[in-house]
Image (cartoon, coloured by chain):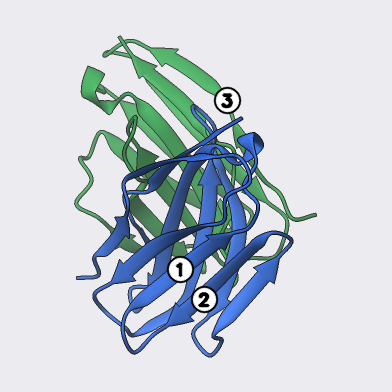
Chain colours: A green, B blue
Amino acid sequence: DTEVTQTPKHLVMGMTNKKSLKCEQHMGHRAMYWYKQKAKKPPELMFVYSYEKLSINESVPSRFSPECPNSSLLNLHLHALQPEDSALYLCASSQDVEKLFFGSGTQLSVL
Amino acid sequence: KQEVTQIPAALSVPEGENLVLNCSFTDSAIYNLQWFRQDPGKGLTSLLLIQSSQREQTSGRLNASLDKSSGRSTLYIAASQPGDSATYLCAAFGGRRALTFGSGTRLQVQP
């Protein structure tokens, strides 16, 4: 199994909502990542977890809250988002410095 | 801080042409370099991974080369087809243990 599964595929939320994005992998990878991609722009790193500990936070606003409950799961909790947060959110995993495997992403629209 | 640049930003070619996409990175201390393909509104499809100790990798009509000392990678696409139309992204995996993406090359192959 070389897949990274992200749910939901699409999400529409209001600015007062709380929602969560989920990411799962069963490749035994110990590093997991969240990237944000705006339309016609490259993906930008948000967070990196290594061995279930947050190792990189790219100065992301606190309305985005990552969580790594175990080595296979990665969540991104969303609260009080702004319309400019609308983007494709990509999850990835890797084994140390090896190849990153990406999920198909969650397309988020904030109204 | 790693910076990745891709040239050209856009490319339109007739079907059957061989073409080269260029990628440069500022910090040569990388573990690997990955090339991805992205179709509009979709996630990332991994094409090729070149480890820092390697010079090139091949997959079908694709060949990627890496020159760490000069901070450059190229993606060669042979006998281009309309189905190759997409955005191609290169990304360097460096000391921060995360991928830094270039801004991409939008390729259009005309039938």
Of tags 3 and 2, which is closer to the observer? 2
Q: Which chain does the residue under circle 2 lie in?
A: B
Which residue lies at the image location 69% right of the left edge and 65% below the top edge?
A28
Q: Are marks 1 and 3 in contact (CB under 8 Å)?
A: no
Question: What label sits on residue B74 in the rendered view?
Answer: 1
Which residue lies at the image location 61% right of the left edge and 30% below the top edge?
B111
Q: CA distance from mark 3 to mark 2?
A: 34 Å
Could you tell me if residue A82 is visible in this image?
Answer: no
- Check if mark 1 and mark 2 are on a common chain: yes
User: Compared with residue B28, is residue B61 higher up or lower down, i.e. above or below?
Assistant: above
The answer to whether B106 appears left or right of B3 in the picture is: right
- Check if mark 3 and mark 2 are on a common chain: no
User: Compared with residue A44, is residue A104 higher up or lower down, i.e. above or below?
Assistant: above
Q: Which chain does the residue under circle 1 lie in?
A: B
User: Compared with residue A29, is residue B15 higher up or lower down, i.e. above or below?
Assistant: above
- Judging by the rendered image, the residue that carries numbered circle 3 is A9
Q: Nearer the viewer, residue A6 or B29?
A: B29
Q: Secondary structure at mark 2?
A: strand
- Disc 3 marks a residue whose amino acid type is Lys
Q: Are marks 1 and 2 in contact (CB under 8 Å)?
A: yes
Q: Position of residue A102 (x, y in %)?
A: 57, 50
